[in-house]
Structures are given as structure tokens and as C-alpha cells.
Amino acid sequence: MATRVLKSLLAPSVRTLCRRYSSQDARTVTLIPGDGIGPEISAAVQQIFSAAQVPISWEAVDVTPVKGPDGKFRIPPKAIESMNKNKLGLKGPLATPIGKGHPSLNLALRKEFSLYANVRPCKSVEGYETVYKDVDLVTIRENTEGEYSGIEHIIVDGVVQSIKLITEQASRRVAEFAFEYAKLNGRDMVTAVHKANIMRMSDGLFLKCCRAAAEKHKDIKFNEMYLDTVCLNMVQDPSQFDVLVMPNLYGDILSDLCAGLIGGLGVTPSGNIGENGAAIFESVHGTAPDIAGQDKANPTALLLSAVMMLRHMGLTEHARKIEKACFETIREGNVRTADLGGSSKCSEYTQEICRKVEAMD
Amino acid sequence: MAGDGVGPELMGHVKQVFRYAGVPVDFEEIRLDREHNDSEAFRQALLAVKRNGTALKGSVETGIDSPTGSLNAQLRTELDLFASVIKVQSIPGVQTRHDNIDVVIIRENTEGEYSNLEHENVPGVVESLKIITAAKSTRIARYAFNYAVEHGRKKVTAVHKANIMKLGDGLFLECCRKVSEEFPQIEFESMIIDNCSMQMVSRPQQFDVMVLPNLYGNIVGNIAAGLTGGQGVVPGMNIGENYAIFESGTRNSGRSIAGKDIANPAAMLLASADLLEHIGLKSHSELIRDAVIKVIVEDKIHTPDLGGQATTVQVVQAVIGHVREKTKQWYSHVH
């Protein structure tokens, strides 16, 4: 009763603010800062988000694996609880040792939260030009199985067998997602990338699922192309591609190839979509241990991934503002980090974006 | 073996060029294609290559529902053509986004993901086996380092995904490392395949000789071909202990352009030149290779894939023109 009276006394704009704020209470997002430059770029994103007054509160967790009672390495339970509660996560780079030690943490996260589709929109960054000017495509990669099933055996000394697993369920799921994504984001065509001439059963099954999904979404164009032909054509004319869907390994390679076309992992966002509305957005570059802690890192990739997350959450206005500020800063060219050809510090770059965001209000 | 797609017409052009160049080679023609793909046809093809030792080949199309699987891959495995070698170089006059590319891609050609071992344990669940052996990895690594030494190259890059496939690619990488120790004069480095792909499109000039397992070799080979002008200009070779098959570097059948007289014959002609060099006919090899390069670089007679409007026949005629000029000189010397 008192609230109602109070609200009617307030100016309309403030009333709207109250209403919006209460219906859109600060959403908690799990933050995984990561290793190497992870903590500093995460801090940069948080700083920019607070400058933009994004209604998000961060819950930072550490995912360094702990040894369970059975001797196997696992993600700490606290991190899992946090993600299960919040459903949304933003993640910095994690280190994975080569050839030994615990299995890949990135893989473990994906398995744990059923993050079945990795989405990487690759669009030429205005103002940061590469020799490829007209890139605007999205790679959608099956994220849970395929060549990354982690199943390998030494059969006899000197003979190793790695198993690539393709299931109808996972293939169908990612194919469906690809078409839905295309529809939701106004894209025209989905291309299935495969090597079914060589891996007839496995890629053949994947292809079959893509074809079935295409049948259900006749309003989106569909075609199939061999992986090697895609590579051949991609480096000659990337503008012919729109949405690409493929199994795990090809997706890994192709999405990095496409990132290379637009300027590298330092400017490429990425999102991992899971079942039940869960999603983790992440920067996909490495931990860059050689520059960690020196205020030299480029937070753009993590920032753009966070922007992807805002769009996923429906906070499109905030997303637009932050993205605009970021691209303008890059385009103007005065305050760029070293990897983009400038000489500014991470903190200077971050401050410039904050300044621009604040000026937009 | 003309194969499918543009294979037959390109083989015809090669034969014609050989005639004008006076190449002392007879071709035994084998039919292995979409319509002749049963086990008998395959056996005949195999015997023929074993009999003659070298072959020039178009690509045999593999239907996705075909019961035999890729006959191209089977040929390579049966003949143990363990090394696929693709040389890519920037060609002056061919407009590309990057210049000064000079890379040799040496790809293990008989195992890895191409082992053709798949099974469906339960409906909807398929396993595909990728096999990596120490023996084959060591063999290809040694081939790569020897190649580097023989051709005055300075660096070998091993490409892998050992952070994910720790045992399989880990073994491949370890074999490369061990072999590199026998060649201290050659620089050795390793790179993860996804980073490698990114590097290829941003700074391909950093690569010299690359050694890779089967699938990654396929990918990087195609990227490299795309960077230097595409499938029309890159030749490929499959080398074994006893046999060798020469073909186009990207192994496309070119089904969509078959019979239209727009295919670029350069890749196949350059492959045929490589074949001649392999069997010791060095001057004929150079004759044909020089002629092809002259047509592309100096005469600038380009087929549509290079942005031009010439027909296949026009390119071939131009090549023959240069060949005849040169052979006239040879014979005028004799007299």
C-alpha cells in the first residue's frame, strides 16, 4: 500500500526505472576468470559492465581441478553448484597441458553442463583490417563428442587408436540448433561440413541428421560441402559462407581458421549453448602466460563474448552500447593494445571504452 | 587413370602435350571411376600401377552410399604410398591476398583418420577409429627431414592436436621429435592444428616444410592451395617405397565443370611434369613445367578459376606453343 502511494508520487521516468529494475533484478552470472591473463581481462569486463550499469552481479569461481576420493581429477563442486544455479557463465582462458596430466578442463566443463553447441560469429572488425574484408559467417560446432571423446588406447606398443564417436542424438541436436539459430538471427543458409566420402558411417550419420533438420526448416537454405573444399574456398572467398555446422574436430579447426580471417582470437567471441537454457560464453584465446600480469592483455574477445551473453539474456540495449563503444575505440585507433597494433595498456583501453559507454547515457 | 569429372579431358590434354614434347612415355589407360568401381576394376588398376611403377591420376568419385568407400584412399593404402607431397608457391601474376608463399606439405597418406575402420555398435552410435603408429609416423617424419635436406629447406613444422588426442597425436609428435634429433641442421618446431590454420591465413610465409598426419594434411594442403591460386594450379604426388602416383594437389574431381572446357589444366600438367622428373626425364619435365608457368605468368592466359576467361583448350594450345618453340631449338642444335 505504502509502496503504491510512493510510486505514484515519483516522476514517471523514475517509476519506469523502478519497475524495470524490480522485474529485472540483477541476474547473477558465474564468472570463471581463468589462468594467465584471465583475471585481468575479466576485471576489465567487469569494469566496463559496471560503467554501462548492466544489471548483473558476478559470482567468481575457480575451476582448477581437484582430486576426488577415487583419484580422478574433477571440477570443484562449488563451481558446478554455481553454474547450475545461475545457468549463465562467462569464462576466461584455461590452460591445458600437452600430452599428460589431467584431461582438458574445457572439455570437462562442456561435458558437465551438456554444452552441446559452440557458436562463433566471425565478422570482419571495422577498423582492424586484415586481408579479408567481407567476412560475416557463424561456425556452429558440435561440442560434446566426435574426435574429442577422449577415448584413446595403446593397442600394442607403438600403435594407438583414437576413437571418434558420432551419435544420432548429438548430431540431431546440433543440427536443429543450427537451423534455429539461423532463423533467430536472420541468416539465410546453413552449410553442413563433413568428410563422409572418407568417414562414411560417422560423418554419414552426421550428414543424415543435418539433412533431416533441413527438411524441417525449409525456409532456410541448406547445402553440404566437404571439409577440404570448404577450406579451399574459405581462404579464397569467405563471403560465400553464412552459417556452418559441423562435428567437433572440423569445427575446432574451421572456427580458428575463420577467427584468423578477421584478425585472430583476440577479437573473436564465442558462446557454448547447453540444454536447459545453460550457456557459457568465453574468450577462446590462450592464457598468454608471457604477458600475464603486465597490463598488456587485450580484453576484446572476452568483452565481445560477454556482449553475446547480454544478447542471449535479452539485454540488447546494453549489448549494443558496449559493442559500439568497443568497436569505436578500435576504429579510432589511438588506444589499442599491442596485439592490435597499438601501444596502450589494457587498463587504458578499458578506460576508454568505459568513458565512451558512460558518454552514451 | 582418368577417373571422373574433368579427369578424362585433362588426361587427353596431357597426352597431347607429351606428344608435342616428344616425351618417350607410353600410357596404359585404366578405367577406374564411378561406373567402373568393382573389385575387379580395382584389382586391375592396382596391378597396372605395380607393373608400371608410376601413374597419373584423376579423382574417382565416392558416393556416400558406396559400398567400397574411397577407391582413391584404398589405392594409396594398398600401394603403401605413404607420403603425399604438395608444393605450394606464390605465382607471380596470379592475384592472391598473400605473397611469397613457399611451403611444402608432407602428409602421412595411409593411416590416421583414413583407416576406414568404422562400426555402428548400437543404432545411432558410430565409432570411427583413427590409427596412429610409431612406424608410420617415424617413416613420414624421416621422409620430411630427408626432403628438407635434399631440397635445401631450413625448417620442418610438425602439426598435431596432442593437447586433445594425447596418445594418438602425442605419439606422432614424439616420433617427429625423435627424428628431428637426427637432423640437427634442420630447425624443428611443432604447432597445434587450429593455431596452424589461423597462422596460415594471417602469415603463411612463416612456414617452410610441414609434416602432418592424414586429416590435418588434407586441411592444410587445401588451405595452402587456396592461398596460392586454388585447385587449378597446385600439383600433388603420392610417393611410396616402390610406386608413385601423380595427381592434382587438392584431388577434386571437378564434377560441376566437367566437359565445359573451363577446367584449369595447369595442376595436372604440372603433376605430369613431376612424374617425368620422378622417372628421370628431367629435361622433358622442365620443358613442360616452364611452358605451363610461362603461360600463366607471362602470357597471362587464365581460366575462370584464376579470374580469366580462357578455355582449357586455349591454355593447352599456349603450352604446346611454348613446347614446340623449345623442341625446335633442341632439334636445330642437333642438326
Image: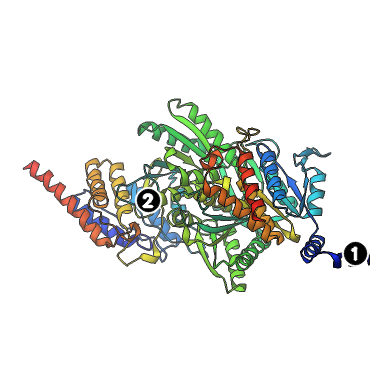
Where is residue A69, by image quadrant? top right
The C terminus of chain B, quarter of image: top left
User: Residue A57: where, in percent of width, then height?
Assistant: 78, 50
Q: Which of A75/A51 is in front?
A: A51
Compared with residue A208, is residue B232 higher up or lower down, i.e. above or below?
Answer: above
Q: Is residue A333 left or right of residue B125?
A: left
- Chain letter belonging to callout 1: A
On residue B96, the disc is: 2
Q: Give the residue displayed 29% in from the left and 52% down from the top.
A: B269
Q: Which of A165/A305 is in front?
A: A305
SS class, disc 2: loop
CA distance for labels 1 and 2? 68 Å
Residue lying at the far right in this picture: please name it. A1
User: Residue B147: where, in percent of width, then height?
Assistant: 39, 35
The N terminus of chain B, quarter of image: bottom left
User: Residue A209: where, in percent of width, then height?
Assistant: 61, 65
On residue A3, the disc is: 1
Give the number of callouts. Answer: 2
Query: Dot 2: within a 10 Å radius of its alpha carbon, few (fewer than 14), some, or many (20 or more) residues?
Result: some
User: Residue A174: where, in percent of width, then height?
Assistant: 64, 61
Could you tell me the amino acid type at mark 2?
Thr
